[in-house]
Amino acid sequence: MRVLYGMLLMLLLLVVAGILFIYSGFYNVAASVPHAALTRWATHTTMHYSVEARSDAIRVPNLDDSQMIARGARTYEEMCVACHLKPGTDSTALHKGLNPPPPNLTEEDDWAPAEQFWIIDHGIKMSGMPAWGESHADKEIWEVVAFLQRLPELSEQQYIELANPEKEGGAI
């Protein structure tokens, strides 16, 4: 019985210490200060496994349709470039100011299409990534995912032609 009381006391002390830490203002929440390595690892790992678990049941449509990819490119140009960049752009004011920094989607990543769909649809808490599913149909989100499959291999000129068809040819 003494062990049980000891464990309960330890739990109570941890809860009180946590509450004191929260109300102390000790932790710096400024976006201009990088996360500690442990915080960065914990949040990224939690996010990765959460997305993986929640995207398992998502059925991926055919993402090879050129019109679907072109529509996704235009949507990406309108909604995503400021944070996730485009070929030929190293950074933007918004990209620089976010913490954690958003991934540069012009580079290869390790997210499967179903996971990309889930992230775009639901967003990521405390990262600046909005839940686009609140304002966009699944079809539109899949168009962006289809485009993301091609983005890392696009040159700057190919991107311009695809994302801005009124300026260029607009074909893949």
Image (cartoon, rainbow, N blue to C red):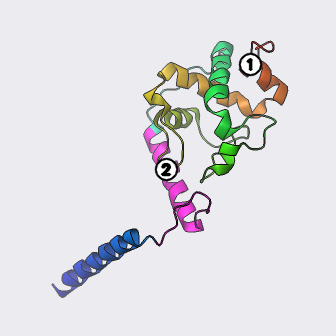
Q: With 67 as the anchor, is 127 left or right in this view?
A: left
Residue 137: percent from the left, percent from the top? Answer: 47, 21
Q: Which residue is mark 1?
A: 164
Residue 59 or residue 87, whichever sits in front: 87
Q: Is residue 53 magenta?
A: yes
Residue 84 or residue 172, whichever sits in front: 84
For label 2, the crowd category at 10 Å Cα-Cα, with few meaning under 14, some 14 to 19 and many 20 or more, is few
Residue farthest along the bottom direction in this orientation: 2
Which element carries disc 2, helix, strand or loop? loop
Image: magenta residue range: 26-54
Q: Chief secondary structure of the magenta span?
A: helix
Relative to 33, residue 161 above or below:
above
Residue drawn at x 46%, y 26% as measured from the top left: 135
Asked which quadrant contains residue 11, the reply is bottom left
Q: Is residue 74 magenta?
A: no
Residue drawn at x 53%, y 32% as measured from the top left: 117
